[in-house]
């Protein structure tokens, strides 16, 4: 594939943006052209040839910017290869095994014939926003559980699939 891949994401506290950047880096290392952008800032998806959409998980739901992105850009996404990711678990469960997508993501995957999904460990830092975040932090359950090796390996798999398309 010779076009551009969009990696876009919904985040509240920023840690999902770093996962998106790591995905973009791995795609670039595999020779692809990539742009990253917050999901709320994407004006249209037409100039892209593949899209990776990620969202932080809050109370069992994908971040609203990721959900809105999918709704708003459905016509474009339906004709492109798309992958989804979620970031959330504040423990090692995402590194220990596959965590399936939450319901709305599963539905969007079926609708758009998405190529794949991964759940990555999340991060909750001391400066996180919100009453509930501070309560989680006070209970000692914060921390950084992002597994950047797993992120890079997943993104390399996407790159292999996209490069295969171009060669056919
Ligand atoms: C109030 C609150 C609710 C959360 N709910 C979930 C959840 O339902 N599932 C999950 O896996 N992680 C949950 N998390 C963890 C976040 O998904 C994790 O901190 C994530 O990395 C945040 O991404 P962001 O920094 O991009 O906003 C929650 C965190 C907070 C503060």
Image (spheres, rainbow, N blue to C red):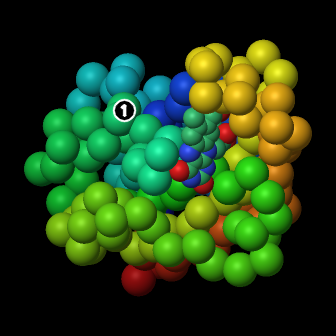
Category of crowding for the residue at label 1, using alpha-carbon neighbours closer than 10 angstroms: few (below 14), some (14–19), many (at least 20): many
Q: Is residue 75 visible?
A: yes
Ligand 1 lies under 8 Å from the Cβ of mark 1 = no
**Residue 94: % across, % down:** 71, 67
**Residue 12: % across, % down:** 55, 26
Callout 1: SS:
helix
- Vertical position of residue 165 compared to residue 13: above or below: below
Where is mark 1, residue-wise? Answer: 65
In depth, the one of 147 and 126 nearer the eye is 126
Q: How many marks?
A: 1
**Residue 146: % across, % down:** 79, 51
Residue at x 29%, y 59% (from the top left corner): 104
Residue at x 41%, y 63% (from the top left corner): 102
Residue at x 48%, y 46% (from the top left corner): 59
Of all residues shown, which one is farthest toward the left?
A: 75
- Left or right relative to 81: residue 164: right
**Residue 129: % across, % down:** 64, 17
Looking at the rendering, the quadrant in which ligand 1 lies is: top right
Residue at x 27%, y 23% (from the top left corner): 43
- Left or right relative to 157: residue 164: left
- Vertical position of residue 57 compared to residue 47: above or below: below
In depth, the one of 39 and 128 nearer the eye is 128
- The quarter of the rendered structure image containing the C terminus is bottom left
- Left or right relative to 20: residue 29: right
In depth, the one of 142 and 158 nearer the eye is 142
- Vertical position of residue 27 compared to residue 158: above or below: above
Q: Is residue 17 visible?
A: no
């Amino acid at each position: 594939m010779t076009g551009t891949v969009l990696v876009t994401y919904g985040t509240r506290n920023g840690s999902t943006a770093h996962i998106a950047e790591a995905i973009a880096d791995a795609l670039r290392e595999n020779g692809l052209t990539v742009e990253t952008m917050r999901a709320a800032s994407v004006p249209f998806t037409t100039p892209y040839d593949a899209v990776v959409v990620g969202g932080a998980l809050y109370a069992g739901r994908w971040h609203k910017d990721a959900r809105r992105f999918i709704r708003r850009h459905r016509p474009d996404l339906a004709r492109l290869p798309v992958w989804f990711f979620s970031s959330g678990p504040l423990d090692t469960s995402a590194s220990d095994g596959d965590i399936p997508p939450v319901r709305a993501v599963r539905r969007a995957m079926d609708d758009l014939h998405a190529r794949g999904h991964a759940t990555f460990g999340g991060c909750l830092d001391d400066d996180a926003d919100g009453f509930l975040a501070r309560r989680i932090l006070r209970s000692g359950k914060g921390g950084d559980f992002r597994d950047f090796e797993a992120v890079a390996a997943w993104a390399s798999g996407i790159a292999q699939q996209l490069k295969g398309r171009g060669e056919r």
